[in-house]
Image: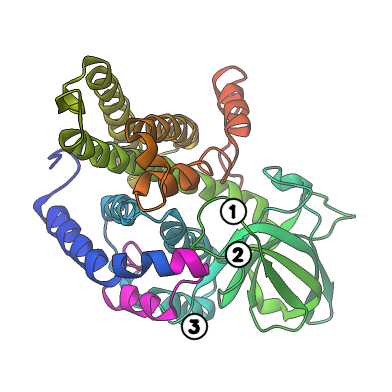
């Protein structure tokens, strides 16, 4: 246990969470991966245990715990061998619910945040569009005021929980003629007329429902615009640091899981009269991988501590995701190679890990976009601090 970041209470929380996942989640993973549908019952069980409200206010059923309880949740979710299930949980808890908590009115929080923490409702965050990708400013979805309603038209894609969630947090452009950069954060119920979704067929994350969503003259009351008017762009930017750090933590955790599994396999697999963990070439690559994981994990913990204290960590969060996902991809690639033909078989975890990990450098801002953000901060001295 790392005494600098984790207390005895953190350790006990990890043990309880691991036992819960072993009992309630792991036995169902293969079924969810095959069907692409996560059982609704598991959300209520997660809510009953408090795992969906770790850092949210007690007023709405949360636990108000520090960020390292979230780190533990993210790390342990990577150990269930389903990037899709892990993504469904953290996309609900740290993407959709983050906006509910930060920008939602008291009435919205009482109805939606409370139900999200209990597992009665599941949410998704809708930002990416077919023609926009990582370019938030290029989005085409619009919200036009018509009396006491907003009329929303457009489409979103690559949305985790995009098909089976109960509500959607949608970023859309407002007042295009007067202020082209004006955006709003809107809360839309799934059953609102004009909302439709189709599931996308993916390389990995197969347990989660990644969807493309269309909005055809969707009418919602004005009180479902969250936050301060058209400042949605800045709200999105404000929360990107947490999302990118989450993906960096996910990366170091899945790399660690892959390496631990591979080391165990190497201790049991024999070739030329000895176990393959005795071969120097393999041993030295394991040493390199263990070093790379430890370095990025320690960095991630330091960034998490700073973020928990309210510090500005946009640069460091981008670095976390950029380097963490790169390391995870290479570690998992090499670990699969160490298993030889068995690494290519679906009954072993490395095949699924290999597919699931590949989304790391793409989702939540591609590595190319992150490099440019980091370059602007380091070279051009640009600040991405919000202008709220």
The N terminus is located in which quarter?
top left
Q: Secondary structure at mark 3?
A: helix
Q: CA distance from mark 3 to mark 2?
A: 16 Å
Tell me how far mark 1 sits from mark 2, CA to CA: 9 Å
In the image, residue 22 lies in the stretch drawn in magenta: no
Secondary structure state at the residue bearing disc 1: helix
The foreground one among 33 and 299 is 33
Q: Residue at x 18, y 60 (%)?
A: 13
In the picture of the structure, the residue carrying the numbered disc 3 is 111
Q: Nearer the viewer, residue 207 or 268?
A: 268
Residue 271 vs 229, above or below: the answer is above
Residue under the image location 52 percent in, 51 percent down: 204
Question: Residue 81 placed where, x, y %?
Answer: 35, 54
Above or below, comparing residue 364 to residue 162 in the picture: above
Residue 340 visible, this orientation: yes
Category of crowding for the residue at label 1, using alpha-carbon neighbours closer than 10 angstroms: few (below 14), some (14–19), many (at least 20): many
Residue at the disc numbered 2: 227
Local crowd at mark 3 within 10 Å, few (<14), some, or many (≥20)?
Answer: few
Instruction: Tell me if residue 242 comes above or below residue 225 in the rendering.
Output: above
Query: x, y (%) of residue 271?
Result: 21, 27
Left or right of residue 144, residue 371 in this image: left
Name the mark nearer the viewer: 3 or 2.
3
Q: Earlier in the sequence, mark 3 or mark 2?
A: 3
Magenta range is: 32-56
Label 2 crowding class (10 Å Cα cut-off): few <14, some 14-19, many 20+?
Answer: some
Between 314 and 312, the one lying in front of the other is: 314
Q: Locate residue 304: give its quadrant.
A: top left
Q: Which residue has dot 1 on it?
A: 235
Residue reaching furthest to the front: 272
Secondary structure found at label 2:
loop
Assess whether mark 2 and mark 1 are in contact (beta carbons under 8 angstroms). yes
């Amino acid at each position: 246990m790392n005494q600098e970041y984790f207390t005895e209470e953190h350790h006990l929380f990890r043990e309880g969470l691991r036992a819960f996942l072993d009992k309630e989640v792991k036995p169902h993973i293969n079924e969810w991966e095959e069907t692409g549908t996560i059982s609704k019952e598991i959300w209520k069980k997660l809510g009953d245990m408090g795992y969906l409200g770790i850092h949210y206010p007690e007023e709405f059923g949360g636990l108000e715990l520090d960020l390292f309880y979230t780190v533990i949740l993210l790390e342990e979710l990577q150990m269930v061998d389903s990037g899709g299930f892990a993504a469904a949980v953290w996309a609900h808890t740290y993407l959709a619910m983050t906006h509910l908590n930060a920008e939602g009115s008291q009435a919205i929080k009482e109805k939606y945040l409370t139900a999200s923490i209990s597992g009665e409702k599941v949410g998704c965050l809708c930002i990416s569009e077919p023609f926009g990708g990582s370019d938030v400013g290029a989005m085409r979805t619009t919200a036009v005021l018509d009396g006491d309603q907003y009329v929303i038209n457009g489409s979103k894609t690559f949305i985790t929980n995009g098909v089976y969630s109960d509500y959607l947090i949608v970023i859309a452009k407002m007042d295009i003629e007067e202020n082209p950069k004006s955006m709003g954060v809107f809360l839309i119920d799934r059953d609102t007329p004009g909302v439709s979704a189709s599931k996308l067929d993916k390389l990995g994350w197969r347990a989660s429902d990644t969807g493309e969503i269309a909005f055809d003259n969707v009418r919602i009351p004005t009180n479902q615009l969250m936050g301060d008017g058209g400042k949605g762009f800045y709200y999105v930017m404000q929360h990107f640091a947490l999302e990118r750090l989450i993906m960096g933590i996910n990366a170091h955790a899945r790399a660690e899981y892959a390496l631990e599994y591979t080391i165990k396999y190497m201790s049991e697999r024999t070739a030329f009269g000895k176990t393959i963990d005795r071969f120097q070439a393999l041993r030295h690559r394991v040493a390199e991988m263990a070093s790379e994981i430890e370095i990025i994990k320690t960095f991630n913990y330091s960034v998490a501590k700073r973020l928990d204290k309210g510090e500005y960590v946009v640069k460091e969060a981008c670095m976390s995701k950029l380097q963490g996902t790169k390391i995870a991809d290479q570690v998992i690639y090499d670990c699969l190679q160490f298993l030889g033909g068995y690494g290519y078989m679906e009954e072993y975890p490395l095949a699924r890990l290999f597919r699931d990990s590949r989304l790391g450098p793409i989702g939540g801002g591609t590595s190319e976009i992150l490099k440019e953000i980091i370059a602007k901060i380091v070279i051009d001295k640009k600040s991405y601090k919000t202008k709220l």
